[in-house]
Amino acid sequence: MHRVLVPVDGSAASERLADALLGLREWYREPLEVHLLNVQPPIASGTVKMFISRTQIEDYLREEGIKALAGARARLDAAGVPYQHHIGIGDAAETIVAYAREKSCHQIVMSTRGLGGMASALLGSVASGVLRLAEVPVTFIK
């Protein structure tokens, strides 16, 4: 099995990743084991935590993660491609790289920019961070 991590944030660019990955399947000698990952930013404000319980915050982050994963999951489901999905919380680049390491992924396939991308930047900040930190090949899809 060739384990591929596909980070998605719910942006149009990240949703196209599933389609691109499906188009690239014949490039691989081994069957793909796809891992979809959405990373939610932590809610660090002490003021927020005074009025909202930890459970409510976790439920909210899980709901947002499920929404962000929906497009990629639907595309993989329609193609009959099995996958695992996960929602992480933390710095996006660090969480992506840590997840790839934890799951022994052979490759990361991701968008050059997502929801927070600036048109003038060559790579988005998350993509740049993953490229700098990753210990496995990173493939970018526009």
Image: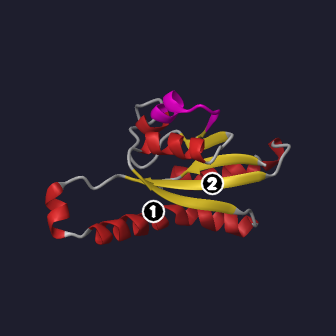
> In whole angstroms, how far apart are the C-alphas of marks 2 and 1?
14 Å
Question: Is residue 11 placed above or below 105 in the rendered structure?
Answer: below
**124 sits to left or right of 78:** left
Tell me, yes or no, if residue 22 can be seen here: no
Residue 137 in picture, x, y percent from top left: 65, 33
Disc sitting over residue 35 in the figure: 2
Tell me, yes or no, if residue 47 can be seen here: yes
Disc sitting over residue 65 in the figure: 1
Q: Which residues are magenta?
A: 128-139
Q: Quadrant of the C terminus?
A: top right
How many numbered discs? 2
Q: Name the amino acid, label 1.
A: Gly
Residue located farthest toward the right when viewing the structure as drawn: 29
The crowd level at tag 2 (other Cα within 10 Å; few <14, some 14-19, many 20+) is many
Residue 92 in picture, x, y percent from top left: 43, 45
What's the residue at 45%, 40% (across, down)?
A: 93
**139 sits to left or right of 117:** right
Residue 112 in picture, x, y percent from top left: 52, 39
Determine the secondary structure under disc 2: strand
First in sequence: mark 2 or mark 1?
2
Question: Is residue 39 placed above or below 137 in the rendered structure?
Answer: below
What's the residue at 53%, 59% (across, down)?
A: 86
Q: Name the amino acid, label 2.
A: His
What's the residue at 28%, 67% (across, down)?
A: 54
**122 sits to left or right of 100:** left
